[in-house]
Amino acid sequence: MSELRDVSDWWATGVSRIEPGVIELRGRPVQELIGTTSFASVIWLMLRGQPPTEGQARLLEAALVASVDHGPHAPSIAAARIAATCGVGLNNAVATGVNLLGDSHGGAGQQCVELLGDVVRRQAEGAEPATAAADAVAAWRVRSPYVPGFGHRFHTVDPRQDPLLSLVEVAVADGTVEGAYLRAGRAVEAALNTGRARPIPMNIDGATAIIYAELGFPAPLARGLFVLGRSVGILAHAWEESQQGRRNKGPMPPDILPTYLGPAVTE
Amino acid sequence: MSELRDVSDWWATGVSRIEPGVIELRGRPVQELIGTTSFASVIWLMLRGQPPTEGQARLLEAALVASVDHGPHAPSIAAARIAATCGVGLNNAVATGVNLLGDSHGGAGQQCVELLGDVVRRQAEGAEPATAAADAVAAWRVRSPYVPGFGHRFHTVDPRQDPLLSLVEVAVADGTVEGAYLRAGRAVEAALNTGRARPIPMNIDGATAIIYAELGFPAPLARGLFVLGRSVGILAHAWEESQQGRRNKGPMPPDILPTYLGPAVTE
Amino acid sequence: MSELRDVSDWWATGVSRIEPGVIELRGRPVQELIGTTSFASVIWLMLRGQPPTEGQARLLEAALVASVDHGPHAPSIAAARIAATCGVGLNNAVATGVNLLGDSHGGAGQQCVELLGDVVRRQAEGAEPATAAADAVAAWRVRSPYVPGFGHRFHTVDPRQDPLLSLVEVAVADGTVEGAYLRAGRAVEAALNTGRARPIPMNIDGATAIIYAELGFPAPLARGLFVLGRSVGILAHAWEESQQGRRNKGPMPPDILPTYLGPAVTE
Amino acid sequence: MSELRDVSDWWATGVSRIEPGVIELRGRPVQELIGTTSFASVIWLMLRGQPPTEGQARLLEAALVASVDHGPHAPSIAAARIAATCGVGLNNAVATGVNLLGDSHGGAGQQCVELLGDVVRRQAEGAEPATAAADAVAAWRVRSPYVPGFGHRFHTVDPRQDPLLSLVEVAVADGTVEGAYLRAGRAVEAALNTGRARPIPMNIDGATAIIYAELGFPAPLARGLFVLGRSVGILAHAWEESQQGRRNKGPMPPDILPTYLGPAVTE
């Protein structure tokens, strides 16, 4: 009996309660959510346990929309398109893409939330904003040469940055969020660009990290939310590819051969 | 030159245009979507190429919300929770869950869209509704003993069915959708339950299949959209599990041993 | 108590027995296998429940060796290399490749075992070999335009075919296998090439399907064994890529842009 | 032209050369390997670029054999079995298991190679063996409370340890390997157990890490090789499960409900 208890406890959860005739999400009957609550608000509810305010939902929705796609150059998109030609289900193709949103591909938002948190913490301990930002960046660079949330191999100005940060400013003005992470992000951007000819702009991971941090999401959920947003683009690309009729698509046309690096073996 | 052309064409896409400083989703600059367009509407845009009407977006949103979770009994949820204890990224845990939404777990909506399409086709060819439904079910059963979208091992009445179908009825009344697939779904339900003591109710896959078919989504995208909805629950569960501190969680507590089926080897 | 029984039974297995201090694989203590049994023989043991004869192990080993790699044009290899640059574990990169060995990429061997089985069955029912092969191919083409195990977009002569079939011939001669599937494979090849100028050669999936069928593996395990063989190449490529220092590698260099297929939106 | 060059170079590899009629693995024609070279030796060739000596192959083979399975309590095995009931391909089920061999599930061997390397390095810099081991363990514990390769929640004596270490001793005696990592492993075991009543034994990850380190594999390949070995058990379990007829298997029988942790919502 106590062991049976253990089995139920082994799978204990506060996310949902599913019993015959009952589906409750974070304590709310699903039938009360259907038709009344936006998909973005349900995402918040499921991750936070409470529904968002209208202003919170608006910010979350903007960050999700900004993340949906970055074309076939993105490894996640390319891999999902390749998968879609291999005779697997559309879910397997999406999973293939999501699986690639690792530390360097989908993890920059998570890392940037950590970096911004470090800036805010240093300020709370009395550092000047500029010093806090410079010190946090220096501390990060001990870990990694890549400062997350800044710089892009592609865009010198990322078209997603301005509308996202404008929405954060509005949310600061109306009291939806406090603004500490927005200020931290701007301070990091200033620290990175002091004395540089070619600027290092904030990128999508930086702008969404500001939003997720302002909204109180723990850092790993910045990656989690990026996964939900990017899944849309992954699905759209996998679906398009599946309609184009290729089988077992490689990364380039079959008549282009990879350069062979290996030595000839002569024994 | 023509071969270089081939490489660009090999990765041709109409989903998005990404160039330095430019991110367009289905021809629309992403900066015009951020802050103006709901996440559910962007899902529609990415999959269909055009934005939805307000009524279409409302139906899609309801179907997505209805699909987000079904607790740790669902293989996708269980596997994602297990993954979250194995020292992989949160994206890998979500991918693990999504990867399991195969033909029998996440594919019932897709199959039900096919089934309802068959009913509608038979009616278009002159069959009476009841006959069309009965014949489509009989034809399906040649393929598989499982009629997709109907029956549940758990719920005798699925709490998600009524609110979803009510929304479809409203959408039929206001002209958002035509209603042929709703009628087909009800006809299949009637055909399945004629003369039965214990009813076979329509389930979530059936109700969402009606919505996706009414909205004009091709059948495979019913699975694709289920993937997007269920990803939310998968993420929420993986995240919760990752906060509970277990390492390498198996399916049951370590002191419960699997029954051994194999013969002892005596040589 | 009976419910606790259920939990143990729910996870019942005859593959292995794991208890404190005990690890038995198919009833054999693992310590008796270590150092005495080849990896290929343990693969056989785990899948079949009994160890192979020496001749069986030799054939299995040859088929595994023949399958390990086909370079970056193979979707599984390409996707694994892409994954290895995304900040995920080496296991996640291998899983990405394996996940793509679907019906059209890794499933041809499985399908070819089914096709050869159909030829053998038709002969057992009295058909002449040539007729059995022609009829089995015709029956297959109703299902799919791709006859599995024959033809290659790349190799007009596959260098793996001759050594594999020679080994089967030796195994037929020494009584290790019966030879019915080898004869069926040759009959299918003849049927496909009757009256053709440009020959359709047997490919690796055909040659290994003959081996797996002769050895008595059920068709789905032809895919399973291909997975084990190809995992080696997937790992070797993912590892090499991880040592080359790229981050978030796309399918082509960043300065080559995908062709944009979508219409400009003008509203 | 130079850009086309770039595409070939983007996919450059020294692992294999695949051209029409040519398949070379590490510079060796595949037809020369088929029938002459064991699967384990080809694994070595693919990862190292040269074939192993007989003694090296024997050690590698033993480590692979020792790793194949640890039953349904292992998350990788459980998840693969769950996947096998969801209507996905056998390759997708194997990929699901492999995907879970992350830092804490399949990464202990890799970490133990690092730890043993640290011990050897400290000795090379002049430390006594016991001090080197104690200091390396202390340094590791700053990173993580889990010392990789030692301790098991299940086995107080792991039956795989003795046969594996005996083989290493033989290989040291005959000059196949040098023995520094074996001595380091024993020193770590001694350091961990000094003054303890309940011993912390070396586990499979420790024993295989010694082998992989002695054979000169870089640490990440200890995980890679574990993936290849464990894939066999993952496949065997997924295949067995797929033959048992369950659909959408959850982690426990449907009549056992997960404990609900969440608060009732009363508004």
Image: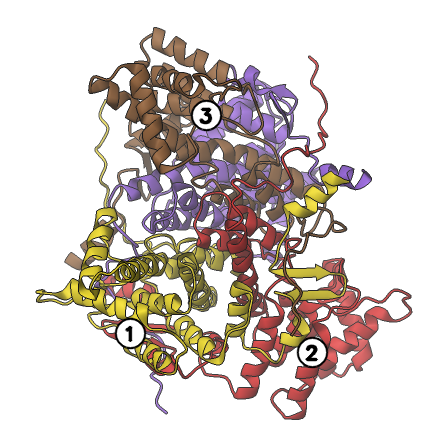
Chain colours: A red, B yellow, C brown, D purple
* Left or right for B150, reference A39: left
Tell me the distance, in whole angstroms, between the alpha carbons under discs 3 and 1.
Answer: 49 Å
**In the rendering, at what x and y percent does residue C205 appear?**
45, 27
What element does badge 1 sit on?
helix
* Left or right for C240, reference B100: right
**In the rendering, at what x and y percent does residue A117 appear?**
67, 75
Q: Which amino acid does label 3 sit on?
A: Phe
* Left or right for A37, reference A124: left
Looking at the rendered image, the quarter that the N terminus of chain D falls into is top right
Label 3 is found on which chain of the structure? C
Do marks 3 and 1 both belong to one polypeptide chain? no
Label 1 is found on which chain of the structure? B
What element does badge 3 sit on?
loop
Q: Which amino acid does label 2 sit on?
A: Pro
Tell me the distance, in whole angstroms, between the alpha carbons under discs 2 and 3.
Answer: 55 Å
Q: Relative to D87, is A146 above or below? A: below
Judging by the rendered image, the residue that carries numbered circle 1 is: B161
Q: What residue type is labelled 1?
A: Gln
Q: What is the crowding at mark 3: few (fewer than 14 residues within 10 Å), some, or many (at least 20)? A: many
Residue D2 showing in the rendered view: yes
Q: Nearer the viewer, mark 2 or mark 3?
A: 3
Q: Quadrant of residue A187?
A: bottom right
Q: What is the crowding at mark 1: few (fewer than 14 residues within 10 Å), some, or many (at least 20)? A: some
* Left or right for B214, reference A103: left
Label 2 is found on which chain of the structure? A
Contact (CB < 8 A) between labels 2 and 3? no
Judging by the rendered image, the residue that carries numbered circle 2 is: A163
Judging by the rendered image, the residue that carries numbered circle 3 is: C150
Q: Relative to B168, is A91 above or below? A: above
Do marks 2 and 3 both belong to one polypeptide chain? no
Contact (CB < 8 A) between labels 3 and 1? no
**In the rendering, at what x and y percent does residue B95 appear?**
48, 56
